[in-house]
Image (tube, helix red, strand yellow):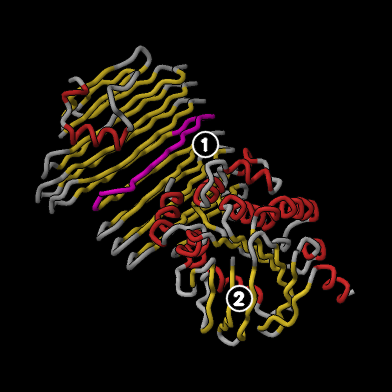
Amino acid sequence: MEFCEFSEVEKQMLKEVAGLYAVPEGAYNFRVNGKSVSRKSSSNIDVNIVDGGLVINVKPGTKNESVHIPVVLSKTGLKETVKNTFNIGENTDVVIIAGCGIYNCGENNSEHNGVHILNVGKNAKVKYVEKHYGTGGGGGARILNPTTNAYIEEGAEVEMDLEQIKGVDSTIRKTTANVGKNAKLIIRERLMTHGRQTAESIIETTLAGENSAADIVSRAVAQDLSRQKFNSHIVGEGKCRGHSECDAIIMDKAQVLAEPALDAKSIDAELVHEAAIGKIAGEQIIKLETLGLTKAEAESLIINGFLK
Amino acid sequence: MLKIDKVSYKGILKGVGFDVFDNELVVITGPNGSGKSTLAKCIMGINKISSGKILFGKKDISKESITERAKLGVSFAFQQPVKIKGVTVRDLLISAGTNKPEKYLKMVGLVPEEYLERELSNTLSGGELKRIEIASILARDAKLMIFDEPEAGIDLWSFNDLVDVFKKIKKDHTIIIISHQERIIKLADRVLVLENGQVSRECTADEFLEEVK
């Protein structure tokens, strides 16, 4: 399928979740309304479909390549669950652009449940980008429930950039990671909810290997009557370093619950968590007003910057 | 440029009155608790005055919002800089109205490459935040610049830079500085002493410094 054959709504979704204006370089799979509509492997990245889900194999030593696997739901009432597996070879350096956009203009709920398994080989470096977006004026809910399980082998590094800024009515995102010797996990999560949306983020990290490390930062903005829950659990099994931070701006009549937990199973485990929830301070707005911004402009600058 | 006419505020200011003329540098000094910062915040609109008038140009701005006063050309550097997580130094300076934020960081002795993308948060020291606060006012390049104790919280090296900045900009800006520092007072065209919510004395810098010796 050529890019120009996508509907305008689908193009809009692809732009929002994967920054695509055309078919990308390298390997890719476009999944639209429950079907793979366009797929390509590269010489180093093999994209296959097995039991309806993707199996993506990245050859050892592959450097500076990317694979795009955006998902678009534009039919109301569609509910799907898909499992994708990534086998990342040793000594690679790759970027995975995942992401899902839902356009729902009908009265029935649309739901995507994506399960991603990342098997990351020794000394590999992976950047995993996942952006979620919803739009459409119907009464049906837009529901996204991603699960990502990462198995990070010795010396590897996985950086996850997770973003859900707009239009998703309900989400439960679950991320687990098992981090091996000298390996590292970095997570940067940004969540915004408004209206009556709900979002729950569960991040479970096991620092299994000696000198393993994790740095998890979640930033969230909850507006209107929305509800958010952040649950980060780091287990340190040996000599390791783990840091978890939840920073949330709460507005209007929203609710934010942060439940960070640390579990050190060794005296050599160094684990830290920070959680801060608060409104935008009046003095912050005033400072920006003294520069000529209106209150709305000041709030927007703070929120957009906070979630950048 | 600015006329403060019998301004009172919650018993802290008691009928304060004075004028500030175009391209004049006025230092307001006085004992702690005399109402200096309160007065500056009244001019910016952060504090709403109980009675009296504030005229900017010929316009009565007494009831204007902070934003409106800023748009008219009033600017104010806080004594205690405000931390704003999520807002970078670049965001702040661009919001102040410049498309050359680097220039204003250099003016306050900061290396732009090291600071532009940093957030106004705990990652910056008090002294760094203070210099950035001053840079934001320089970047506004407003008709009236008010600095509330610009020397507070910065080191001597930075203070020397700051004095040089004021020397440079005083030629073609109208400036009010709240300060107790002799080197800043020496820059003043006029010194106003605020005591117990009123202007108790108005004199030249030399006269003031001679009196307090």
Image: A254 above or below A230: below
Front residue (pair A277, B181): B181
Tell me the residue that label 1 is attached to: A184
- Apparent side of residue A51 relative to residue B25 in the rendered image (left or right): left
- Relative image position of residue A109 (x, y in whole percent): 14, 49
Image point (62%, 86%), residue name: B14
Does residue B144 appear in this view?
yes
Front residue (pair A219, A175): A219
- Relative image position of residue A158 (x, y in whole percent): 46, 34
**Rendered-image quadrant of the N terminus of chain B:** bottom right
Chain identity of mark 2: B
> Based on the displayed image, in which of its 4 quarters is residue A195 positioned?
bottom left
Residue range corresponding to the magenta coloring: A152-169
Question: Is disc 1 surrounded by few (<14), some (14 to 19) or many (20+) residues within 10 Å?
Answer: many
Does residue A265 appear in this view?
no
Amino acid type at mark 1: Lys
Asked if labels 2 and 1 share a chain, the reply is no
Question: Is disc 2 surrounded by few (<14), some (14 to 19) or many (20+) residues within 10 Å?
Answer: many
Find out whether residue B127 is within the magenta segment: no
Tell me the residue that label 2 is attached to: B38
Amino acid type at mark 2: Thr
Marks 2 and 1, how far apart in space?
A: 51 Å
- Relative image position of residue A13 (x, y in whole percent): 24, 36
- Apparent side of residue A157 relative to residue B162 in the rendered image (left or right): left
Furthest toward the top, the residue is A43
- Relative image position of residue A4 (x, y in whole percent): 19, 23
* Magenta stretch secondary structure, dominant: strand
